[in-house]
Image (cartoon, rainbow, N blue to C red):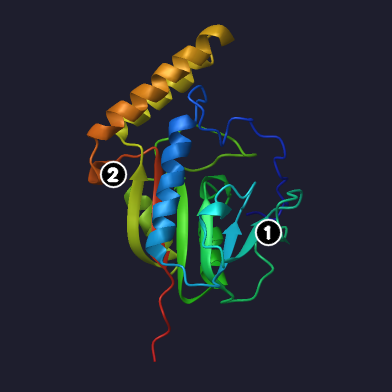
Amino acid sequence: MNGDGPSYLSERRPDVFQSRPWSPFAFVNLKLRRLIAELLTETAIPPGATVVDYGCAQSPYVGLLPASTQYIGADIEGNPEAAVILRPDGSVPLPDGSTDVVLSTQVLEHVIDPALYLAECARLLRPGGSLVLTTHGIMFRHPDPEDYWRWTCDGLARIVQDAGFEVVQIRGAIGLLASAVMLFQWGAAVRMPGWLARPFIVVCQALMALVDRFESEDAKKHDALVLGIRAVRPAVKD
C-alpha cells in the first residue's frame, strides 16, 4: 500500500504456483496450500459468508472456500482477476464491517506499510470476523513487484495485535531443516546449466519433504519458511 499507485506484476514465473517435482516451489506450494486450507477450515466460515481476498493475484486459493461463499478478489489496477480495484493508497473501496473473512496470502511482505494494510483488514471485517493470513518467515527475496519484509512468529503476532486483532493461532509451513534445503537449492540451481538444474531441484524437493517430517509443529512455528496466522476482530462489547 502506498500513495504512488503500485503497478500489477502481470508476468510472473510460470512455476510460481506449480507443484511438479522439478518446480523449485513444489514443496512450498504443497505445504502452503495445505496450511491455508487448514486455517480456513478452522475458521469455520459460515454459509453465504463474504470473503475478501486482499491482494488476490490469480486467486489461487478460491477453490478452498465453501461453495456458498461470496468471494471478492481485490487487487491493484491491472489485475483482470480482481472484482474490486484498490485505491492508489492500497485501501479497499468497500464499506466498514462488510466482510466476514479477509484472506491474505503472501501479500504482507510486498506492501510498503504493513500496519496500514492490517488496519484496512480490520476495517473491512465485521466484529467477530476473521483474518486468515500467510506471509514470509525464513524466505529468500522474491519481488512482486517489490519484496520488503520478513517476520518471526513473535513479530507477526505483535503487528497483527497492534492492528486490533486477537490472535487465535500461528502456524509454520516448512521447518528449519527443510528451509535450509530450500535456500541451498535456490542459491545453487541458478548457477547450474538447465540440464543439471532440473534433476538437482527434484532431489532437493524430495529431501525437503523427507527432513520436514522430523520437525514438530511447535518447531515449525518458531522457525518456518512461511508463517500462517488466524486472528479475529473482537466483537463489540455491550
Left or right, 229 with reference to 106 = left
Q: CA distance from mark 2 to mark 1?
A: 33 Å
Q: Give whichever of 142, 43 is nearer the camera.
A: 43
Amino acid carrying mark 2 in the image = His
Residue at the spot 37% in from the left edge and 61% down from the top edge: 42
User: Which callout, 2 or 1, points at the residue further toward the start of the chain?
Assistant: 1
Q: Which residue is mark 2?
A: 222
Mark 2 vs mark 1: give the one in front.
Answer: 2
- Is residue 161 at least partly visible in the picture? no
Left or right, 208 with reference to 77 = left
Q: Is residue 68 above or below residue 134?
A: below
Q: Position of residue 139 (x, y in %)?
A: 44, 34
Q: Is residue 145 above or below residue 164?
A: above
Q: Which residue is mark 1?
A: 89
Choose top left, top right, bottom left or bottom right for residue 82.
bottom right
- Is residue 190 at least partly visible in the picture? yes
Q: Give whichever of 55, 70 is nearer the camera.
A: 70
Q: Position of residue 44 (x, y in %)?
A: 41, 67
Residue at the spot 65% in from the left edge and 58% down from the top edge: 73
